[in-house]
Amino acid sequence: MNGVLGREARTRIEDLERPALDDRSYRIITLPNNLEVLLIHDPKTDKASAALDVNVGSFSDVKDMPGIAHAVEHLLFMGTEKYPQENAYNQYLSSHSGHSNAYTASTSTNYYFELAVSAASPTSSGTATPSGDPEPVPASKEESPLWGALDRFGQFFICPLFLEDTLDRELKAVDSENKKNLQSDTWRLHQLNKALSNPNHPYCHFSTGSYKTLHDDPIARGVKIRDEFIKFHSTHYSANRMKLVVLGREKLDTLEEWVDEIFSEVPNKDLPRKRWDDVSVYTEKELLTQTFAKPVFQSRSLDLSFLYRDEEDFYESHPSRYLSHLIGHEGPGSILSYIKAKGWATGLGAGGSSLCPGSGLFNISVKLTEVGLEHYKEVAKIVFQYIAMIREQPPQKWIVDEQIQISEVDFRFRQKSPPSKTTSALAGVMQKPYDRKMLLSGPSVTRKFDDKAISDAMEHLRPDNFRLTIVSQEYPGGWDQKEKWYGTEYKSGKIPEDFLAEIKEAFENPARPVELQFPHKNEFIPSRLEVEKKEVEQPLKAPKLIRNDEGVRTWFKKDDQFWVPKANVHIYFRTPMPCVTARTTVMSQLYRELIYDALVEYSYDADISGLVYEFSTVSTGLTISVEGYNDKLHVLLEKVLVSIRDLEIREDRFKIIADRITRGFHNWDYQQPFHQVGSFSRYLKNERGFLTDELAKELEGVTAQDVQQFYPLTLAQGHIEILAHGNLHKEEALKITDLVEKTLKPKRLPLNQWPVRRNLIVPPGSNYIYERQLKDPANVNHCIEYSLYLGNTQDRAIKSRLLLVAQMTDEPAFNQLRTLEQLGYVVFSGGSVSDQWAGYRILIQSEKDCKYLEGRIEHFLTSFEKMLEDMKEDEFEGHKRAVVNKRLEKLKNLNQEGNRFWTHISNDGYDFFQAEEDVVHISALTKQDMQTFYMHYISPSSPHRAKFSVHLTAQAKPKQATPEEQKSDALAIFQQILTGEKIETDQAKLAERIKSLPSDKDHTSEMIVEAITAYLTQDLQLATSVVDKILDEAKAALGLADTPETLIKSVEELKIEDLVKEGKVPVYIKDLKDWKAGLMVSKGMRPVTDLGEFGEGAAKL
Ligand SMILES: [Zn+2]
């Protein structure tokens, strides 16, 4: 066999440059069909993964079908010859704790999945730690989940079916994805930039696609769309354009054998790699233009975009990083520092981007204040003055040396990221011309100073080679154009001669503000990188309590498994003060933002050297964290603490920050509805807390002096709790504790005054709806979050059942509500756990109204009763295994471990062994347990259920489908249902019945249902029970399912007190205060065990 012969003679590259602690082994091979593969053997991983990147993306879209590359990405997964069932792949992954995803970029389409390495559960026994030895590798490929997934995955690239009856549905999913982005400024402004570039460059086009561009328009032109998708695939998909990465616990030889067997079948057409060398993103026509764009959010910015180059071939020197480092610097002497001092700006970013082989841009974006917007011309001139200052000097070697040092240290101590992130990213990297030995290091490490390349790069930043965009809701008004795809209003023209002349003058005149300077030497670059490595048999599962007195608790764990010169220090300052009222909450937020504002210049060097801090206010106090290289951690920590204690609030900075927060509150209402809904649900679950509009009102009356007087009160009294974790000794942890205590010097907050975390209890039999209209008049999407209260998070019986029910309903809910019923692109289901609230929820964002969605959710929950009843024992056990695998998932890096400890400390539960406890409880569950649980807490028929839902309703209405569109949709969907039910159909007869219906706008849906009924009963002569079942499905898929009467009529209308009592009729929450006052509160969070057990003298854990 060709493959075998090829294997013997093949070249294998294995000596990749890698991080110091990387225990994976790598091998790069090329299959006989020219498919290049990277194999990764990870002896300790608990997840396997693969990713395949195809070198074709939206830049190759057919001109009159924008979005086709993206549509092919969606359609490719709809059935293969070997596994024709359309959800075979996802079901397989789901049953092995796996998931998959894909994305389409300009020159790449990237597909990936991840799943458990073994079909068995990892061993676990109560509080003991799971065995440190890796699970044995499955003995044969038939037993290996990875093999099964690879075989299913590979078929998509060998023999995809593009099943006709899934086409319509997937195009709707694409449409819904596009609609989700319509009101997002990121998408809108990006598209505007694209639209105003050279129309002959593919960058100019719309890449997501919609039902109109991929279905309606081409069909109207007489195009057979399915043929177009197949044609796109056969024109561009070819083995030599694909890069495959497979990561598993199996040996490299085994992985190589498997990949050979499956992927050698992918057809090779020897297609060339696409380049766009002879077409420029901006021509003379697009350069030197200024565009004023009106955003959805209240934001202001000035963007300068220079015609640049792609830097693919300069990966050893990364010349654009020299420019972005200097222009984007935030320390003393920088552009930002100068314009921030003038009160003009709050942020600045700069960087080069390679759009495709052959083109690149260099962008500078400045976030402006209100006054800054008035001075945008000066800001632009200052940017050019700074650029001229850099260009006056030859490239500075010491600056690049700093970059080399930082990037090398970062690479050397890089820790593992999740398998699918690794494979997906590397498959993308492999499309680039890196030396194969530098595949891992190439994108991040700068390895040499190339002054020629930097000089050439600087050449691009000239006053005759750029364009400007000014984004503002107020200025200058009179937008006279609309971008085609998103409707962004704008106005555009050449930069006026006099403004351009001023810019040239600023660029050429060597006299410039003395404030603009090169940065000083970075003192935060870590130099002490030693790690004391003491191998242990078992990593500790919990930190030790090394100090515990009335004022302070200190938790400490010296790293015993990751061996990086890094540490995390978290500080929790317990006090009820920050969130007593909406007003104090706003003042706390101002305080926090003012601290960040004051520390920008100081912390920037630390930030780029891998050392960051965070300061936040939570309902029960303040938190401060510092994370990164431990060498200079204490220096940054001390500075942060002193600033927190001594902040002097300047009137001018206060105004700028207050304005930013005000806009943030305003913009909150213009986010995607599914980003908003959680705040309302949280508000209903908690006894205390405030909604955004309440905070916004308070903000109006707060002054700088108010905050100056308020924050010392917050710090005056409190309890300090610290976690010090990582490459630190106990003595250092205690020293840090002293530093915190001596700097903040709070009065003691006695134990019985500590704030307690509780939740509201929604009583059994509840059925509430809280309804609210969304403020964005242009948004067409409604959103529902449907919540069921199950009980207390610290109740292990409830918690374990919740985890399992979330796992079992995950795939069916998605399949029913999103895939089959097409309710919307955003569909989530699962557990929601916070403080003492353990609940189950389903969230949908949809053009269908919330009452309809509520009905569909209940319909799904009812239908799941039967699915659970019919569930085979081995499938049930599979679900248990999937949850157990997730709970026992290995920690990937030091931060993950630190965050896990911190979660358990800062929520007052100290439940460090939670995962192991959950596993014990889950392992013991039977199907009967789950049925009992489901029928009591979740099934809509249960009188004991405790439910509320939040309905966010849209003001705008989506475009109504025409009767003809409704008919063709109905035909496609119905056909698919019949295929699913394995019923032989007479397509012509069915089409005849539906197409011949009169075009009556108001009654088309009813007539369609009648026609379908007639077809089922008269033409097919099916039994009534079958007819009912099919009609039910058809109505749901057509969006015509009945909304339960109880949801349409209000309680008053129905006047059935008993129904209300039983929870069968929802009660609308009208008065929030009254509603909350009518509920009981839960127990408070308490330590699950005596903290004495964590003391140093305590028995070994
Ligand atoms: Zn998509």
Image: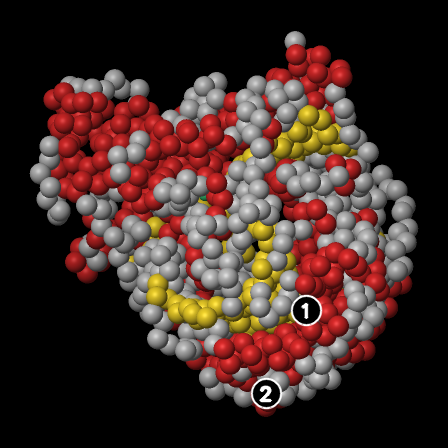
Mark 2 CB in 8 Å range of ligand 1?
no
At horizontal 83% and vertical 70% (from top left) the residue drawn is: 521
Amino acid type of the residue tagged 2 in the rendering: Asp
Q: Residues within 10 Å of mark 1 (few under 14, many from 20)?
A: many
Q: Nearer the viewer, residue 1076 or 393?
A: 393
Left or right of 337 in this view: 474: left
Residue 276 visible in the current orientation:
yes
Residue 292 point in image, percent of width and height: 44, 71
Secondary structure, mark 1, is helix
Residue 885 in sight here: no
Q: Residue at x 88, y 60 (%)?
A: 527
Image x and y of residue 727, in percent: 84, 55
Question: Could you say which is closer to the camera, residue 950 or residue 973?
Answer: 973
Residue 943 position (above or below residue 140): below
Task: Name the mark nearer the viewer: 2 or 1.
Answer: 1
Q: Which mark is residue 761?
A: none
Q: Where is residue 868, by image quadrant?
A: top left
Q: Quadrant of the N terminus?
A: top right
The three-letter code of the residue at mark 1 reads Ile
Which residue is identified by label 2? 652
Q: Nearer the viewer, residue 638 or 925?
A: 638
User: Left or right: where does residue 342 sit relative to residue 664?
Assistant: right
Q: How is this picture coloured?
A: secondary structure
Count of all numbered marks drawn on residues in the image = 2
Residue 1004: image location, x then y, percent: 14, 42
In the rendered image, which residue does mark 1 sit on?
A: 327
Mark 2 or 1, nearer chain start: 1
Q: Residue at x 37, y 52 (%)?
A: 179
Q: Residue furthest top?
A: 1
Question: Which residue is nearer to you in this view: 1027 or 343?
Answer: 343
For image coordinates 69% across by 31% down, the residue present is 38
Q: Position of residue 1060 (x, y in %)?
A: 27, 54
